[in-house]
Amino acid sequence: MEYRQLGSSGLEVSSVGLGGNVFGPPRQDLASSIATVNRALELGVNFIDTAHIYNNGHSEEFLGKALAGRRGEVILASKCHLLQLAEGESIAQRVRSHCETSLRRLDTDYLDLLQLHFPAAQAPADEILEAFAPLVQEGKVRHIGQCNYAAWRHAESLGAAQHLGLPAFITAQNQCSLLVRGAQFELLPFCQARQIGFLPYFPLAAGLLSGKYRPGEAAPPGTRGAAGSPTVKRLRTAQNESLLSSLNDFALARSRTLLELAFAWLLSQAVVSTVIAGAMSATQIEQNVAAGAWRLDADDQQALDGLLNPSTPDWQAEPDLASFR
């Protein structure tokens, strides 16, 4: 396993991380979740990402049980959000409430990383940072980050943190894959310049880069596509189907799989700290870790760029909640 810097935190995280949105009903029961986490740790995975809202809190609860006695082996990240604030509820109250609930569910007294899950256009940058700061000062949170911000919003937040002398966001977690490459336009260069750790989610484009889907054919049983996922429908365009065929041929010509190529391309970006991928079983985490071992050489990178550059990637600078279904 390769380990990389998590932004400016000084923490080293495994290049392949584990996404927590698969833990809890309806996706994995407790026994399966524990088995997946145990196998991940055995393989050197040390970054686990979850969120307050994943599976109605079951993700954090299951992870708390899976990590019993092993908390020190992982860099643990969760997320809070500012959606649907109650009347009279302040931003500071919401952030603290979500953080303390996550700590209780995860059975830990600190989070290595707490991220704001979605942009909150109604909330000033300084007010958001002021809500996170006491949690850092109290030791309940070591570092803070954001998810789904456009580069300009993160830059605004950095300026506010510097002006006010508050902890700043050190990570950016956004969707990025061979089919959703819009982060390359501005966000990745911004993160590189400001030493922000980039955490790509949906690295397999909601499963389209897993190798299970075939152009022109119905989604395989048991997949997100078969369940009617709007994200899969949006991404299964004629352009992307053609690109998937070309990418698959590219991988096969090098005795690799499409899954391996998906990880290799993301890990070729120096600013990427860890690739967050969910796993429904111990076998899947083994496949993800193995896929993360391939590094593209200069010739491969040039040839791959030639395949990608003519196409315009799907991109939403600041996706809404519907983009995750």
Image (cartoon, rainbow, N blue to C red):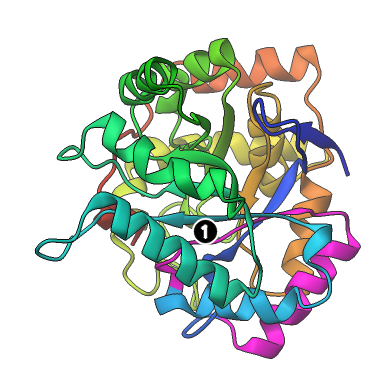
> Horizontal and vertical percent for residue 111?
61, 55
Question: Camera-side residue: 239 or 9?
Answer: 9
Vertically, is 308 above or below 217? Answer: above
Residue 232 image-quadrant placement: bottom left
Please indicate whether residue 289 sits to the left or right of residue 218 in the image: right
> Can I make out residue 286 in this image?
no
Q: Secondary structure at mark 1?
A: loop
Residue 270 image-quadrant placement: top right
Q: Magenta residues?
A: 28-54
| Residue depicted at 53% across the width and 81% down the height | 24
| Residue depicted at 74% across the width and 40% down the height | 252
Vertically, is 177 above or below 32? Answer: above
Q: Which residue is mark 1?
A: 213
| Residue depicted at 66% across the width and 37% down the height | 249
Vertically, is 153 above or below 218? Answer: above
Question: Camera-side residue: 268 or 276?
Answer: 276
> Horizontal and vertical percent for residue 178?
53, 35
Question: Camera-side residue: 134 or 290?
Answer: 134
> Horizontal and vertical percent for residue 195?
60, 18
Q: Quadrant of the N terminus?
A: top right
Number of callouts in the render?
1
Please indicate whether residue 152 sits to the left or right of residue 80 in the image: left
Alpha-carbon neighbours of circle 1 within 10 Å: few (<14), some, or many (≥20)? some
Magenta segment includes 36: yes
Q: What residue type is disc 1 on? A: Tyr
